[in-house]
Amino acid sequence: MDNLMTNYYDSASMILFGVGFMTLLLNNNLIKKIIGMNIMDTSIFLFFITKGYIEGGRAPIYAATQSQSQNFMNPLPSALMLTGIVVAVSTTAFALALTIRIHDAYGTIELDKVIEKRGLQNEQP
Amino acid sequence: MKSLILKEVNRFTVIIIYMFGLYIILHGHLSPGGGFAGGTIISAGLVFYKLVYPERSKRIINKDVLMKSICGAITVYGLLKSYHILHGILNHTAEKSLSQVPFAIYSAGSLLVLNCCVGVIVACTFYSVATLFLEGDL
Amino acid sequence: MNNLKVFPIIIILLLLLTAFVMPLIKKRKGVFFLSLTTVAATFLLSAGMLRTVNLVGSYFIKVGPYEAPWGIAFHIGYIEALMALLFTGVTLMISWYGVYSIHKDIKEDHIKYYFTLVHILLAALLGVVFTNDLFNGYVFIEAVTLSSCGIIIIKNNKNTSKATFKYLIMSVLGSGLLLMGIAFLYAITGQLNIIAINNELVKVAASKQNIVTISLSLIMVGLGVKSALFPLHTWLPDAHSSAPTTSSALLSSLVLKAPIVFLIKVIYQVYGLEVIRETPIFSILLFLGVAGMILGSVFAIYQKEIKRVIAYSTVAQMGYIFFGIGLGTEMGLMVSLFHVFAHALTKAMLFLCVGSMIEQSGYKYKDEFRGIGKEMPVTLGAFTLGALSMVGIPIFPGFISKWYFSIATINANQYIFLAFILASSLLNAVYYFPIVINGYFGIDNVKGKIYKSKYKPIKEVLPLAVLAIAMVMISGYSSVLLEFFKLGLNIK
């Protein structure tokens, strides 16, 4: 329990991951699934970026008016997670466009009603 | 949209939005931002313009212009990056940039051109996604 | 020799550059010509890559001017060169078939976007196989997911919309779990390069046993969703049966295989077999693989559409591969890689045959294909060869892989699973042989139906013949391939 309170970044990111995962799995509405996907991805980015924290460091950017040798934090996880954020945004855009297609084809965006309509058309498992 | 407030605000602020986005793109190697963030801001400005003048923007920025700018920018990005990757593998050293003055715009070699290409791609992509959602077709 | 080592980078860059030139080309024949010449060029380059690995041994390339822990490195050994040869060869055959038949499935002005997506898919698959960096592997796997969703939804009807959404949501679940596993590995070792992680993990693994188990199980489930591990396969039948023909062939033969190659690299080269044997993960994989083998075939017997039959057969064959990984020995991994090869060629050929039968006759359900052998003998002949390979008749690669799976099972002292391998072969015969026998010898009840001409010209059947010949050649060269895979697994 002590460990959970000292590393509160990791505990918060795990709780957010669980919330996002459950939202993705258990909701019927397609938009809520996409929101859950975003929460899950954001929590992983939070977990990764906080691994780059060094005590007493400042943001790893050189500015013209200050001296060059200071304590910087690790810039590598932040740079990697930029790529991850772009991937998450592209997937969200694609999923939203797919939701519009499903609405045009079936007339609803609740997943259980879509499965009902598909089940009525198909006569096989 | 036919609101008068929107039209008047558009006259004054859409230019400032474009300039701000361009500033973030051009200083991508010196401060946080770069191609992605700057491209998003420029696309927000384009969507704002489209909301106020829908026919004019459909005539100026149609599907042909969007397709050609996205494909052209990706091809330029691809060729420049291929040159750098192959040069780096075959010669084992990093390349020197054009000018060695720190904190100036020209100080990071080809990062400037790459950031501009990424900005064009992101702006055109987000604008076309917003057009698809608003009107159903490009 | 340094100039010959850059072939992998040239392959990926060539595919990506020509992918984005294609939306600007207006004529259909220009798109076909560009795509076929590019994929043929990448096939020749990957043959050159194999020759370089034969001469020099495995090597590392750095992508860009920065060395390994600060930049990205590619590792090229026997596994990567052979997988590149397989992926580009199968894509070449599928694109060649697609030139003659893609306009029957999708609209005329979407054809150039289809080939753009195929190029991006192939580049991303090769990137997953080549890479030596975990986060780079994650980014390429996401590119594979998005472009494979694209090639399903490009045929726009009700079935594909729902199938693609299911596939996308489950894939994103898998990617999230995979990234969490990579984040845990980064938390205890501080590196992302595979060699560097292995060096650090050896020092740290004894004290942090829990994190090793957690990260490995997250990566396993994440990659298992993408390659149809047994209970996580539910997206597969809808997606593979409602897609256009060439997309189904590409998905079943190639897109399921790249995460497996990545998983084998992670298991063998990041963790090492001794570290994993202390955790219960191999037994779980063994059990789920066997369940997939049996239950995949059992579900296939009850399907009525012919494409869904073959999609469930894919689930069963992926069960074989996970069974091989779960045995936990080096020979098990070698045989799994050989089965990847065999299954890719066979399943591509099966899907192309079934696709041509469906589009020439217009039927969809497997009971309506009686007597089709009289009209399309060559196509049904290729289907027969594929079915014989799936069941496990000698001289076909299916027999070779089942034989070596049995030897690996005996070597690992798990004798009870031999019965399951035999049972699965018999179950495969139960649903493949009726299609073949009804096709050749069934009475065609067409009184009152309108005939379409079912004969396909020779130049459209040639890709199927090339795939069949390649299949038989693989089983001839099987011992050479297994030796190459064994050399390729050790990189120290």
Image (cartoon, rainbow, N blue to C red):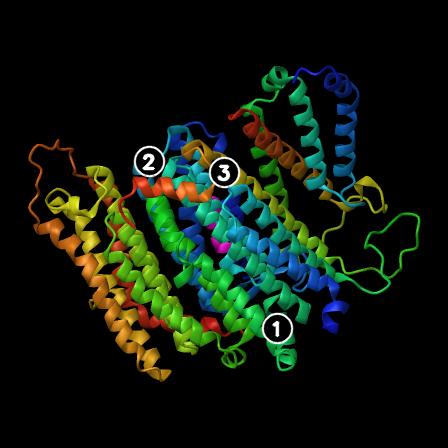
Tag 2 subunit = C
Asked where in the image residue B50 lies, by quadrant, the reply is top right
Tag 3: amino acid? Thr
Give the magenta part as a residue range. C119-127
Residue at the spot of label 2:
C105
Circle 2 crowding by C-alpha within 10 Å: few under 14, some 14–19, many from 20: some
> Does C342 appear above or below B57?
below
How far from the left and from the top, in percent, is residue A50?
73, 60
Asked if badge 2 and badge 3 are on a common chain, one would say no
Q: Is residue C479 visible?
A: yes
Tag 2: amino acid? Asp
The N terminus of chain C - image quarter: bottom right
Is the C-beta separation of discs 1 and 3 under 8 Å? no
Residue at the spot of label 3:
A99
Q: Of C413 and C87, which appears nearest the observer?
A: C413
Give the left or right position of residue C156, taking residue C393 as reference: right
Tag 3 subunit = A
Q: Give the number of the mark in front: 2 or 1.
A: 1
Helix, strand or loop at mark 2: loop
Q: Give the number of the mark in front: 2 or 3.
A: 3
Residue at 76 percent across and 50 percent down: it is: B96
How far from the left and from the top, in percent, is residue C127?
52, 55
Asked where in the image residue A120 lies, by quadrant, the reply is top left
Numbered label attached to residue C211: 1
Q: CA distance from mark 2 to mark 3?
A: 22 Å
How far from the left and from the top, in percent, is residue B132?
54, 29
